[in-house]
Image: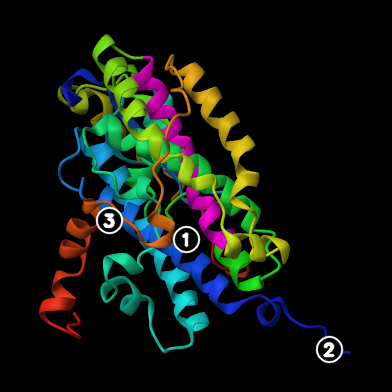
Amino acid sequence: MSSEWPLWEVFIRGQHGLNHRHVGSLHAPDAEMAINNARDVYTRRNEGVSIWVVKSADITASAPSDKGPLFDPSNSKVYRHPTFFDIPDEVGHM
Amino acid sequence: MATATPEATVDKAALLEFLLRTGDNALVLGHRVSEWCGHSPVLEEDIALANTALDLIGQTQLWLGLAGEVGGRGRTADDLAYLRDGYEFRNLLLVERPNGDFGKTLMRQFLFDAWHYLLLKALKGSTDRRIAEIAEKAFKEVAYHLERSRDLIIRLGDGTAESHRRMQEALADLWPYTGEMFVGDASDAALAEAGVVPSPESLKAGWDEIVADALAEATLKRPADGYMHKGGRRGVHTEHLGYILSELQFLQRAYPGATW
């Protein structure tokens, strides 16, 4: 039966002020039940204050085979990292 | 200027009766729902039902814990759950009904949740502070139980021809067990008079409304009020309770005092 239900990705916000984080996925016939199921499956130990669900099919993901072209070129561009500034001691920990 | 506390003014026996009734409803239904663990149609429902069962068993600990205190015979919640015989149980007959199929379990849950919700809502204003505190905690859990069972009976009632048929049958089968929720006795009247609990009769109108709304949305027909089974609240049970207790109490009966 569950194979007929679409897959949903679940995002939970742990505390006020923090971002929603992906916690896992589940099956449900629609968004409303996906929220209820997420509440029962992923917030049993007081994990959350807010839940987002999104159909897995609605997420467009980058292809694993594109990893090289997408990410490797940035490795050679050290000037994109702010590591060339001398931080005065008075600033302390940044 | 000592004002008498409600704890001192109401009849201890009536209060104990109420606490056993409320605790036993949660215990027996919690056990019934826990029977689904590992057997639900989908993983998500399995976890949701187990959560409901755990909520109810948690509530049992609070109600029977207080019953043990009020009873004054040194009995703990565990003693009351594991060492009483069937005729001492005070739960509604509705909650000991067999699970049947998934739809029937949900219909029983909905009919009970709607009543439980109204009961706890009223108990939050109890003149007995201990009862009001337990109700405050349990109400939040039960508000969610009701939201969930209501949603699911609507989906299944207004679902396929097969699910609709099963839900209508479940409703017809369980309906004669709903009347018992609204029939009070002398001890209910005494507690209601003191503002400790609502009278069972006073919950009927609200329950009718919640049930009528949900059934209409579920495209299910409300059965006619015919003969209503009663007895659980005074310890007269169906055979099903015996089977529940033999499983629930086995360990403590076979190995008295066993802990883990």
Q: Which residue is mark 3?
A: B31
Q: Is residue A19 visible?
A: no
What secondary structure is marked by label 2?
Answer: loop
Residue tagged by mark 1? B22
Q: Is residue B5 left or right of residue A44?
A: right
Q: Is residue B172 left or right of residue B191?
A: left
Q: Chain of mark 2?
A: B
Q: Given the image, what chain letter belongs to the residue carrying mark 1?
A: B
Q: Quadrant of residue B186?
A: bottom right
Secondary structure predominantly adopted by residues drawn in magenta? helix
Q: Which residue is mark 2?
A: B2
Three-letter amino acid code at disc 1?
Thr
Element type where label 1 sits in the image: helix
* Residue closest to the eye, B194 or A28: B194
In the rendered image, residue A51, in percent from the top left (x then y), is placed at 46, 38
Region rendered in magenta: B135-158
State which chain disc 3 sits on.
Answer: B
Do tags 3 and 2 sit on the same chain?
Answer: yes
Sequence-wise, the earlier of marks 3 and 2 is 2
Kind of residue at disc 3: His
Residue A71 visible? The answer is yes
Q: Three-letter amino acid code at disc 2? A: Ala
Q: Are marks 1 and 3 on the same chain?
A: yes
The residue sitting at 46% across, 49% down in the picture is A48
Q: Which quadrant would the N terminus of chain A be assigned to in this image?
A: top left
